[in-house]
């Protein structure tokens, strides 16, 4: 894992966006793995601004999101479909049919998980996967204890995760209890991984990531076994690193 330190969130977003834009420009056909949540919103803003100013095109790009809540339709304002449309897809020239997220409304969620996994494989796998990290070290919605070889699956969300995400819902009770997420095995198949960590509230988990051994109790620790991981973290997130 290579650590790149950014002064603040803005610099982190610029650095991450530069890497993504560089790849989008160079490749004739590229598969991006995307995340939602608070961390990547500034990165998506940078991508949109660059698209507007410099005309970087996303016509040849395919995207796969990490996860989606079970039971929320794409029109639900707290769904990840909605988040991606509003925060990125509606503002760039990516073909809508090449933006994939798991379908949390599927009547057969097990079949949906297999379909999503197969789809990623069929598209040739993910070139670069963007990740955030949960306060408990989760990546995607893979909570502590998830097997490292897990593929796309249905998860029951940890109460701490539901609480952290309740800011996107009217009330904590409205946060779904389950989600469909790429597994840790799915994420690890990505050719390159970019983990973004910002803010003082992530300082402790970033310290744990560096200090603790590789264990399923700390899902992000698996990244130490991947050959091509870059962590971009701001000063606040790095404040407990020695
Ligand atoms: C989002 C995702 C999650 C978040 C993580 C951090 O698609 O899969 O793992 O990346 O919960 O969330 P924020 O960025 O809101 O702190």
Image (spheres, rainbow, N blue to C red):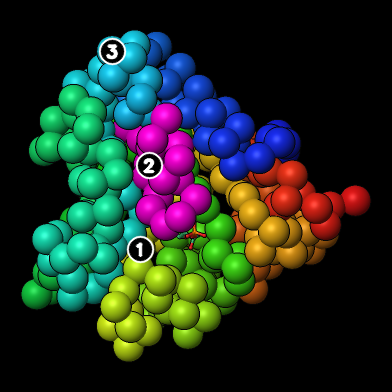
Instruction: Determine crowd level at label 3: few under 14, some 14-19, many 20+ residues with C-alpha closer than 10 A.
Output: few
Furthest-bottom residue in this view: 173
Q: Identify the element where label 1 is drawn.
A: strand
Task: Tell me where residue 216 appears, x and y as whole percent.
Answer: 62, 69
Q: Which residue is mark 2?
A: 33
Does label 3 or label 2 sit earlier along the sequence? 2
Which residue matches tag 1? Answer: 181
Which of the numbered marks, if any, corresponds to residue 105?
none
Separation of residues labelled 1 and 3 (CA atoms): 32 Å
Q: Is residue 45 one of those drawn in magenta?
A: yes
- In the picture shown, does residue 160 fall above or below 200? below
Whichever of labels 1 and 2 marks the residue nearer the N terminus, that label is: 2
Between the C-alphas of marks 3 and 2, the distance is 21 Å
Query: Where the N terminus falls, by quadrant?
Result: top right
Q: Quadrant of residue 20?
A: top left
Give the answer, above or below, for where 211 lies relative to 58: below
Mark 1 C-beta closer than 8 Å to ligand 1: yes
Decide: is 10 above or below 112. above
Front residue of 137/232: it is 232
Q: In the rendered image, which residue does mark 3 sit on?
A: 55
Number of the front mark, 3 or 2: 3
Q: Alpha carbon of mark 1 to alpha carbon of mark 2: how far?
A: 12 Å
- The x and y percentages for residue 200 are 69, 59
Relative placement, left or right, of 69 versus 136 is left
| Earlier sequence position, callout 1 versus callout 3 | 3
Q: Give the residues drawn in magenta, as a range.
A: 31-46
Q: Are marks 1 and 2 in contact (CB under 8 Å)?
A: no
**Circle 1 or circle 3, nearest the eye:** 3
Mark 3, ligand 1, within 8 Å: the answer is: no
């Amino acid at each position: 894992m290579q650590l790149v330190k950014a002064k603040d969130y803005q610099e982190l977003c610029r650095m991450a966006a530069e890497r993504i834009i560089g790849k989008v420009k160079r490749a004739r056909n590229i598969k991006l793995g995307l995340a939602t949540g608070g961390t990547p919103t500034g990165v998506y803003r940078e991508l949109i601004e660059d698209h507007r100013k410099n005309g970087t095109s996303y016509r040849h790009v395919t995207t796969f999101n990490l996860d989606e809540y079970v039971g929320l339709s794409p029109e639900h304002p707290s769904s990840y479909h909605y988040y991606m449309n509003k925060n990125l897809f509606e503002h760039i020239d990516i073909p809508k049919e090449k933006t994939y997220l798991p379908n949390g409304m599927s009547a057969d969620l097990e079949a949906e998980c297999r379909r999503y996994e197969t789809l990623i494989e069929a598209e040739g796998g993910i070139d670069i996967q963007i990740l955030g990290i949960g306060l408990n070290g989760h990546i995607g919605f893979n909570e502590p204890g998830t097997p490292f070889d897990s593929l796309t699956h249905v998860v029951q969300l940890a109460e701490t995760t539901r609480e952290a995400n309740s800011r996107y819902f009217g009330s904590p009770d409205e946060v779904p209890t389950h989600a469909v997420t790429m597994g840790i095995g799915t994420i690890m198949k990505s050719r390159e991984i970019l983990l973004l960590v910002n803010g003082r509230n992530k300082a402790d988990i970033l310290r744990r990531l560096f200090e603790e051994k590789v264990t399923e109790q700390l899902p992000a620790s698996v990244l130490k076994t991947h050959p091509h991981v870059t962590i971009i973290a701001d000063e606040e997130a790095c404040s407990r690193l020695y």
